[in-house]
Amino acid sequence: MSLGDSSNMIENQDFQIVKDSAKTDDKGRLTLGTVAKAKTYRVLINQVGQILLDPIVNIPERELWIWQNSIARSSLEVGIKQASSGELHDLGSFAQYADLEIDE
């Protein structure tokens, strides 16, 4: 499996040894200890058999569109920056529209 230039995927080359030696069990499982506890990883392997565990966060499919639409994502990022810096404009309650039918 090739994912192109892997140097773009590795953001930091400063690796620390977690264990000097680790052996997989009969089912191919490897225990890494608390450093990897309750995390999800993408697993990559290179041509010489070195394995890289890349921590990932899964998102619901219904939210995937924001990551695929760069214009919407940029707009969201601007909004988040504005909100965090206090650039807010209170438009009041929108409760009156809660039961409004929306034509799709």
Image: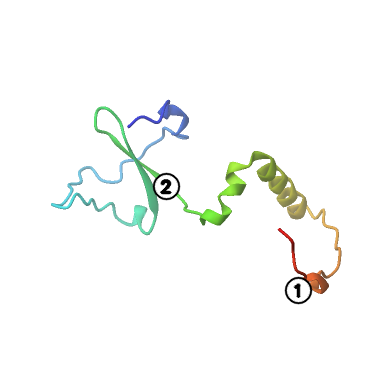
- Pick whichever of labels 2 and 1 is earlier in the sequence: 2
Q: Quadrant of the C terminus?
A: bottom right
Colour basis: rainbow
21 or 62: nearer the viewer: 62
At mark 1, the secondary structure is loop
Q: Is residue 54 left or right of residue 70?
A: left
Q: Position of residue 22 (x, y in %)?
A: 20, 46
Residue found farthest to the front: 103
12 or 52: nearer the viewer: 52
14 or 54: nearer the viewer: 54
Compared to residue 87, the image places residue 4 above or below, namely above
3 or 99: nearer the viewer: 99
Q: Is residue 69 left or right of residue 88?
A: left
- Label 2 packing within 10 angstroms: few (<14), some (14-19), many (20+): few
Residue at left offset 35%, top offset 40%: 16
Q: Position of residue 48 (x, y in %)?
A: 24, 28
Q: Which residue has dot 2 on it? A: 55
Q: Position of residue 90 (x, y in %)?
A: 85, 63
Q: Mark 1 belongs to which amino acid? A: Asp
Residue at left offset 30%, top offset 30%: 46
Compared to residue 82, the image places residue 38 above or below, namely below
Q: Which residue has dot 1 on it? A: 99
Q: Quadrant of the N terminus?
A: top left
Within the image, what quadrant is residue 44 found in?
A: top left
